[in-house]
Image (tube, rainbow, N blue to C red):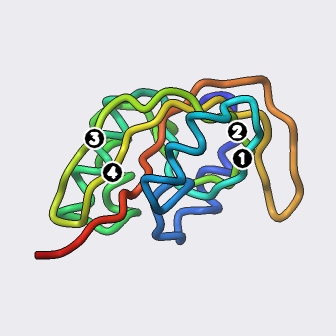
Amino acid sequence: MRSMSATIALAMLAAGALATASRADELASLEQDSGQVHIGTGVICDTQDEVTSFVRSMGEHDPGGALQKVNRESQNPMACGMATVAFHAGKKLGEVRTTKGSFNIVQIEIVAGSVNGEWRMVPHRTQFTAVAMEGYDI
């Protein structure tokens, strides 16, 4: 997030969805075609630990509250934020299960961001996001 403008992070806080895909098969597709540029809106963080903390905090807070908690704990107001970005998908780094669902933690390489509907190229920046996994309630 450090290379992304504050506008990107703050403009997207109202969105409630996590990351870039909603099904595990979409994640597998992302991993297999990492050379392709994907577009998604969701939470991106500087570190794997920060996005994991965000997902866990979602069990207690709304997305905005969870972001504030993670950023406060990391002592960096820009550690995590909501953004619409163009990215290359990277490695799946693990799973987190909460009362809100199960999520894959994924490394991504940001290549551009959207601010007020206008795309701006950014220096390639490795970030981390969470992808909701489809599941069944039993």
Q: How many marks?
A: 4
Q: Name the secondary structure under disc 4.
A: strand
Q: Name the secondary structure under disc 3.
A: strand
Q: Report the amino acid beneath label 1.
A: His
Residue 5 x, y percent position in the rendering: 71, 41
Q: Name the secondary structure under disc 1.
A: strand
Task: Tell me which numbered mark, 2 or 1, is placed earlier along the sequence.
Answer: 1
Q: Which residue is mark 3?
A: 95
Nearest the viewer among 97 and 75 is 97
Q: Report the amino acid beneath label 2.
A: Phe
Q: Which residue is mark 2?
A: 87
Task: Tell me which numbered mark, 3 or 4, is placed earlier along the sequence.
Answer: 3
Q: Which residue is mark 4?
A: 103
**Contact? badges 2 and 1 (CB < 8 Å):** yes
Nearest the viewer among 25 and 117 is 25
Work out how far the residue at label 3 is from the one at label 2, CA to CA, in angstroms.
20 Å
Location of residue 110 (image quadrant): top right
**Contact? badges 3 and 4 (CB < 8 Å):** yes
Work out how far the residue at label 4 is from the one at label 1, CA to CA, in angstroms.
18 Å
Q: Residues within 10 Å of mark 2 (few under 14, many from 20)?
A: many
User: Residue at the location (30% across, 39% down)?
Assistant: 52
Nearest the viewer among 69 and 39 is 39
Residue 54 x, y percent position in the rendering: 32, 47
Work out how far the residue at label 4 is from the one at label 2, CA to CA, in angstroms.
19 Å
Q: Which residue is mark 1?
A: 38
